[in-house]
Image (cartoon, helix red, strand yellow):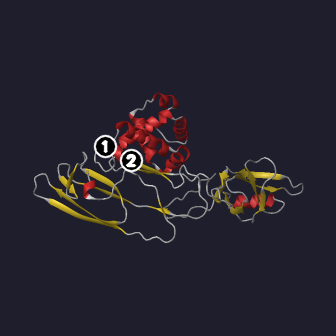
């Protein structure tokens, strides 16, 4: 194939690269999109060989075996096509070709990889976890949790190998993962994997690593018997989770609505400063940060926050006032909330 890349800045991209590749992707539950990379001369040549003077796009369900689900005669100049499909949540494949003149034999030009149409209905499993990781959770600690999870869960080990095969450099081999061995270079590669958007979809979607990390964090929380979120100290006390409205419950029929609200107060200052909230001196973390999580029922709340420098010569004040006034229309339920949360009052700042 000739090099047809742009030779100067501002030059237009070619309309095709003549690779003959056929791409198929799902647009929505009932439409797929096909694109074939054929140049003008290639289209002209194949159209001249076709009994219909144009190409034909075949769509198959699940595999190329048997009769195609759909066969579309496309325009002679076409390089792409949208195809309506009847089943959502189904695997489809495509084949581009033509029928020869005379004996009308099928000639295949290219076949696509598979694509999966998304479902067109809500999943039966409506449970979900929402996780909040505190701002002071060190990335090195998170990496240690990820490495532990990789060692203990075979799917994660397989994913590491998949990422290696896809060209992500530096990741360890399977035997090293099983033994829990990580070099400095491999740890840096893992850090890139955890933060790279380009691989996060594979990592997060197929492996549910967020759930595994949540369990690791909860295990540390329980083993350390950490205090409630409203007590400054170890970051593990700030890990929160709650199930969805249907987690662990039978789905109710009919329309319904649950709502609730919480308040999170957080900040930072010099590590040797004195900070009071609602007139109470609080304990800062080692980096000068602090955070509190409260329930927020209807009412008026006042929590002035004052920071004073270590030598007493400088002061900063934030006069924080909060209120909630909820008005309901129809039957509205209260969404489940962490029972340990208290109202944002001065006496609840410990």
Q: Is residue 253 left or right of residue 339?
A: right
> Callout 1 environment at 10 Å: few (<14), some (14 to 19), or many (20+)?
some
Query: Are circles 2 and 1 on residues that touch, CB within 8 Å?
Result: no
Residue 282, position in %: x, y? 22, 51
Q: Tag count in the figure?
A: 2
SS at badge 2: loop
Q: Is residue 180 left or right of residue 87?
A: left
The mark nearer the N terminus, 2 or 1, is 1
Task: Give the residue displayed 48% in from the left and 39% down from the top.
Answer: 169
Work out how far the residue at label 2 is from the one at label 1, CA to CA, in angstroms: 10 Å
Residue 344, position in %: x, y? 30, 59
Mark 2 — residue? 239
Q: Quadrant of residue 348?
A: bottom left
Of 62 and 242, which appears nearest the observer? 242
Q: Is residue 188 visible?
A: no
Q: Quadrant of residue 254?
A: bottom right
**Up/down of 191 relative to 74, above or below:** above
Outermost residue toward the front in this view: 331
**Up/down of 307 relative to 149, above or below:** below
Residue 188, position in %: x, y? 40, 40
Outermost residue toward the right in this view: 103
Q: Is residue 330 left or right of residue 277?
A: right
> Callout 2 environment at 10 Å: few (<14), some (14 to 19), or many (20+)?
some
SS at badge 1: loop
Residue 114, position in %: x, y? 67, 50
**Up/down of 320 relative to 158, above or below:** below
Q: Is residue 314 left or right of residue 47?
A: left
Of 343 and 3, which appears nearest the observer? 343
Q: Is residue 277 visible?
A: yes
Of 83 and 328, which appears nearest the observer? 328
Task: Give the residue displayed 51% in from the left and 70% down from the top.
Answer: 330
Residue 234, numbered label = 1
């Amino acid at each position: 194939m000739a090099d047809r890349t742009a030779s100067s800045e501002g030059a237009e991209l070619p309309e095709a690269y003549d690779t003959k590749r056929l791409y198929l992707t799902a647009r929505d539950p009932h439409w797929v999109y096909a694109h074939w990379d054929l140049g003008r001369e290639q289209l002209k040549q194949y159209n001249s060989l076709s009994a219909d003077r144009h190409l034909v796009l075949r769509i198959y369900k699940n595999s190329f075996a048997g009769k195609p689900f759909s066969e579309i005669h496309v325009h002679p100049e076409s390089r792409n096509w949208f195809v309506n499909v009847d089943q959502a949540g189904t695997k489809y494949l495509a084949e581009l070709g033509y029928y020869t003149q005379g004996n009308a034999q099928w000639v295949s030009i290219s076949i696509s990889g598979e694509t999966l149409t998304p479902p067109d209905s809500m999943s039966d499993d409506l449970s979900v976890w929402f996780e909040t990781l505190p701002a002071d959770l060190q990335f090195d600690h998170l990496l240690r949790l990820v490495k532990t999870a990789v060692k203990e869960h075979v799917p994660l080990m397989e994913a590491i190998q998949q990422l290696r095969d896809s060209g992500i450099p530096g990741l360890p081999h399977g035997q090293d993962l099983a033994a829990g061995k990580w070099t400095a270079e491999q740890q840096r590669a893992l850090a890139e994997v955890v933060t790279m958007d380009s691989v996060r979809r594979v990592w997060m979607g197929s492996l549910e690593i967020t759930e595994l990390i949540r369990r690791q964090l909860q295990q540390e929380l329980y083993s350390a018997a950490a205090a409630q979120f409203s007590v400054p100290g170890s970051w593990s006390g700030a890990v929160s989770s709650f199930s969805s409205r249907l987690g662990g419950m039978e789905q109710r029929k009919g329309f319904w609505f649950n709502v609730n609200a919480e308040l999170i107060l957080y900040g930072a200052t010099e590590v040797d400063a004195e900070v009071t909230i609602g007139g109470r001196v609080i304990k800062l973390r080692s980096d000068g940060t602090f955070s509190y999580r409260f329930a927020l029922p209807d009412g008026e709340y006042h929590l002035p926050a004052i920071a004073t420098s270590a030598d007493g010569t400088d002061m900063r004040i934030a006069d924080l006032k909060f209120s909630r006034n909820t008005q309901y229309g129809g039957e509205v339920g209260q969404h489940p909330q962490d029972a340990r949360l208290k109202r944002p009052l001065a006496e609840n700042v410990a």
